[in-house]
Amino acid sequence: MTTTVLTLLNVILGFVFQSAVAATMGLSGASDSFQLAWSIVTFGTVLFFTLVPILLVPRLENPITREIGLGDWPKFVMLGTVLTLAQLLIANYCEPGLADILRWSAPSHLFAAMTAIPLAVAYIRKRFVVAGIGPAINGAALLGSFMLTGTTQQPSSIGACLTIGYMCQMILVGVFSMNRGGPFGVGSHISIRLYVFLVGFTLLSKFQPLLERFLSVVGPTGSTATLGFGQKLAQGLLLFAAFGLALTANATLARKVKSEDLESAADLMAKTVVTTIVFSAIVLLVALPLKDLVIRVLFVRGEFTSSDAVDVGDVLLCQLPWVIACAITGALTSYLYIERSYVRVATAAVIGLVVTFIVSRLLQQAFELTAVPIASSAGAVVTLFWIIWLVARSPIWPHLRRKLGAYRTLLYFSSFSVIVSFGISVISRLTVGSDVGLTNVLLGFFFIVSVLFIRFYRPIWKQCRAATGGKL
């Protein structure tokens, strides 16, 4: 519940910020520059937050003494400095507006790097409020500073807003997670070789959003901004679909796997996967009938027009398979990270990048605005299938398959509901265009019927309670 509330707060702040950006810049060239700069900053900063669950949480704590080693902190500070300098260098080769945003937002990487170990400490000590509120503080600081200075559309002010957000997150997480987070030690638990390998692996696995931004640049003016607004909505939906389960369960799952208690690990993993699928289905069933209304309420004001809202809605519709695929992939890859199957997961990332690039290039001429989001969803779905195949070859699979079998009816119904709702939306968009009022009513009715069926059909309700009642 704590994770959900903090996720909701973070999503709300993110949407309000996007609304302010849309009203100020619309789908203009300046908005394109901002979205591209933001993706570059996020590409670097997300590196450190990704290393928290896959590298730091499973290794920093001594399982016997419960001491947390801080000797690896300089590695992160050095890498943050390198990324900051690299962004400053890149800015010299960009057009003036984009260059100013990149220069003033460059310190974000250093602040994110300094947040990584305190964030890991919070998760290890199960202080989920401290860990979860960091992004919300980042969003609040970003929004507040943008409202004070960014609305002037000065690129330097916009870049500074990004830096302020990460700085505030670092301060809050650092102060509250390290306070009584001990015992601490000065030992190092991560070798340089492993650290360099995982940094390279993470950069590769997180390159997808940046690739998509670069692919959108070849489209007409506003293409990058349209993709950015649509994907921001999709990322907000992903936060709800994933529900924070894979991350909050990661430390417990790691302990069970290390102790070779695969039966208990499979039980926890099955509940995480099933709950993720159920919440993903609910998110999609709610998003489809409401997406047009939400986009208009959030964005249509100032420089952002009703026709712009239609374009963003199309991007979001194309990204919904990405939401579900990424949510399930995240739940499955938590185990692969614990098993240190980094090369195999990296292969999945490469496959996703290749599929995204090829599909985007093939569709670019016919679908100028939606080629990239369609390609993104295609890449995510192919990556999901590859990850499933990897898990099916792992030691936990016999136990996991048996545990998942206990939720078979719930999984079948959730998949059926998703396919029907998404199919109705796509067919409606292709046949009646943007006038989808009747379709939204039908989708809303289908959602209500689905919820009632889950609640009053005893086998499904029993499986749902068994999955969501698991203790992380």
Image: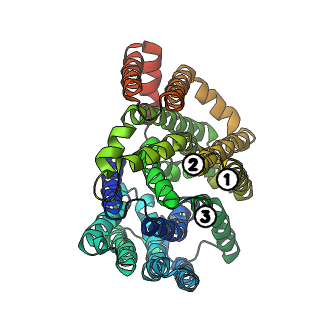
Q: Tell me the CA gap for discs 1 and 3.
A: 33 Å
Q: Judge left or right: residue 241 versus residue 147.
A: right
Identify the residue at image location x=65%, y=33%: 399
Mark number displayed over residue 373: 2
Q: Tell me the CA gap for discs 3 and 2.
A: 13 Å
Q: Position of residue 282 (x, y in %)?
A: 43, 32
Q: Secondary structure at mark 1?
A: loop
Q: Residue at label 3?
A: 214
Mark number displayed over residue 339: 1
Q: Secondary structure at mark 2?
A: helix
Which quadrant, please, contains the C terminus? top left
Q: Position of residue 445 (x, y in %)?
A: 37, 20
Q: Does the rendering let one see residue 322?
A: yes
Name which quarter of the figure residue 279 lies in. top left
Question: Considering only vertical position in the picture, is 68 above or below 432?
Answer: below
Q: Nearer the viewer, mark 2 or mark 1?
A: 2
Q: Are marks 3 and 2 in contact (CB under 8 Å)?
A: no
Q: Nearer the viewer, residue 127 or 165?
A: 165
The residue under label 1 is which amino acid type?
A: Glu
Q: Does the rendering let one see residue 259?
A: no
Q: Nearer the viewer, residue 11 or 130?
A: 11
Q: Which numbered disc flags the more N-terminal residue, 2 or 1?
A: 1
Which quadrant, please, contains the N terminus? top left
Q: Are marks 1 and 3 in contact (CB under 8 Å)?
A: no
Q: Residues within 10 Å of mark 1 (few under 14, many from 20)?
A: some
Q: Secondary structure at mark 3?
A: helix
Q: Nearer the viewer, mark 1 or mark 3?
A: 3
The residue under label 2 is which amino acid type?
A: Pro
